[in-house]
Amino acid sequence: MTKQLDPQRKEYLKRDFGQGFPKDIGLIVLDAAWGKFETVLEIQPRHSQQDGFVHAGVLATMADHTMGYAAYTVAPLNGRILTIEYKINYLRPAKGKQLYCLGQVVKPGKSVIPCRAEIFSRDQDRESMLCAVALGTMTSVPEEKLS
Amino acid sequence: MTKQLDPQRKEYLKRDFGQGFPKDIGLIVLDAAWGKFETVLEIQPRHSQQDGFVHAGVLATMADHTMGYAAYTVAPLNGRILTIEYKINYLRPAKGKQLYCLGQVVKPGKSVIPCRAEIFSRDQDRESMLCAVALGTMTSVPEEKLS
Amino acid sequence: MTKQLDPQRKEYLKRDFGQGFPKDIGLIVLDAAWGKFETVLEIQPRHSQQDGFVHAGVLATMADHTMGYAAYTVAPLNGRILTIEYKINYLRPAKGKQLYCLGQVVKPGKSVIPCRAEIFSRDQDRESMLCAVALGTMTSVPEEKLS
Amino acid sequence: MTKQLDPQRKEYLKRDFGQGFPKDIGLIVLDAAWGKFETVLEIQPRHSQQDGFVHAGVLATMADHTMGYAAYTVAPLNGRILTIEYKINYLRPAKGKQLYCLGQVVKPGKSVIPCRAEIFSRDQDRESMLCAVALGTMTSVPEEKLS
């Protein structure tokens, strides 16, 4: 995976990333490269579950969207990415100031694009902790087939 | 799975369900029984992804939280449920008025509780469509071990 | 899912099922219908893991192959089924005389075919016990693209 | 994960690994370290599926058993490892001379031990190719609770 992501494509994907539900929960792009997307989320009280940790659904959304845009970086320009499926393991309760997610393409297939993600929690005075790992399958669908 | 869910426990779980992130996105309880939780979500514009469908993360949150509370119905009273992991398959883009989720315990284990969920989209003039299926593993942790 | 499986197609799939690794471990077809395959396996000492239970890999093979042939029943005649991925939960150690597996298509898609499977252990003097559940994704690939 | 695996424990685990079903299919240990197991399998005709590739169940067995023994390297001495669940993605049809699997512990928990595995196919005249990736959850159960 040593290909370059076209700078214009990168700017387009970074803009396209931040809309709808991911924007609503505060997910933002840190960086992108060919086969790779990095995102961060400032933890807010509304992200919590019943015991005060970040809700598993927030981490799933972060993993899903970050893997999806990693898939966009290797997909045809007219392709829209849809999630076929993923699996996520929660390693420890997520808490602190910020979450960081690295999404990576495992194999840049034409229509089926397996991806993985890792989510770390970050705090000022503690080292970052791996909170969740995901493994999933994205698919690239030609834009005209979506409507 | 023919046991009864204690009515007081049921009321407690229905209240406990609706806080934090699930409340923030509008997830509400429809009904609960031993080994089973049913929830609904009115689809809002803020739930969407980049192509106008409901974001995969919204469906994951719904599946996760509904499975988690199904697990609560079979867990010890002093146990708090945490998600170990789950896997979710997206069958078709979710859209319409409302989502309905049925979460069920697959095996009521003492500490490890496998669960499954199905999510349907509902519209006034169309029959309900199966949009996503999930299979996951919850764990019951004694409350005093969480803090 | 009320379509009929053509009787000739059914005979073809039952024969095609029993070759290679599944034949090697003793997996046999019980019945087939549109969207559905049923298989059995007589438990042998060579199927065991280090503590005397049936090895997780035997159950995975059974779930995979049964889901795959369930997918064949809904796929185009010139399509060959490949496994994209699956997830399997082990509910209790499998032991006894025989395993039974029911594989079902969740949604009969054109190229992406999500499936699920349940495996039960059966013994003469005990009721059958659910040992494993799986959820996976099969794909139908035109035969000419495989070589 | 910089701990050392006790040499005696390593020898015990390498012996314990090669019995039952994994031995039956020809799976052998290459090396082991704390949190890590490496295994190989010479591909045989009996491992094949209906189109001549290695059966998905063979790769699942290899991933499962290798992750399981990676879990053993971090588990208490009196603990026996059972598979709670895993998910495996098949990236390309596996063929050639040999398969190599690297299994690693993602987090060395006390009772719940998430693991991952990668399987590569190797051939004399081609570079090794990533064929499958898995993500799963093992559990360590005290030996006396198994019988």
Image (cartoon, coloured by chain):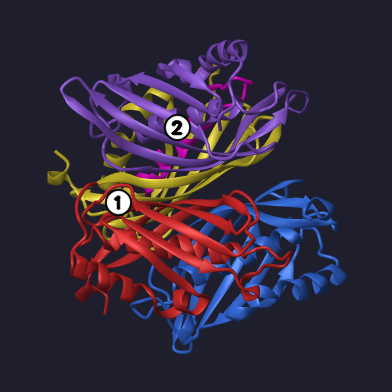
Chain colours: A red, B blue, C yellow, D purple
Q: Amino acid at mark 1?
A: Thr
Q: What label does residue B48 carry, if any?
A: none
Q: Position of residue C120 (x, y in %)?
A: 58, 39
Where is mark 2, residue-wise?
D63
Where is mark 1, residue-wise?
C139
Residue beneath the point at 71% across and 66% down: A52
Magenta highlight on residue B4? no
Q: Is any part of residue D9 visible from this angle?
A: yes
Say if labels 1 and 2 share a chain.
no
Q: Secondary structure at mark 1?
A: strand
Q: Is any part of residue B90 visible from this angle?
A: no
Q: Name the mark nearer the viewer: 1 or 2.
A: 2
Q: Quadrant of residue A124?
A: bottom right
Q: Secondary structure at mark 2?
A: helix
Q: Position of residue B40 (x, y in %)?
A: 60, 78
Residue beneath the point at 31% across and 55% down: C74
Side (left or right) of C20 relative to A29: left
Residue beneath the point at 64% across and 60% down: A95
Q: Position of residue A130 (x, y in %)?
A: 55, 49
Magenta segment range?
Answer: C47-70
Q: Nearer the viewer, residue C101 or B76?
A: B76
Side (left or right) of B95 relative to A52: left
Q: CA distance from mark 1 to mark 2?
A: 21 Å
Q: Position of residue C111 (x, y in %)?
A: 27, 57
Q: Quadrant of residue D130?
A: top left
Q: Is residue D82 above or below residue D11?
A: below
* Chain at numbered mark 2: D
* Chain at numbered mark 1: C
Side (left or right) of A140 relative to C123: left
- Alpha-carbon neighbours of circle 1 within 10 Å: few (<14), some, or many (≥20)? many
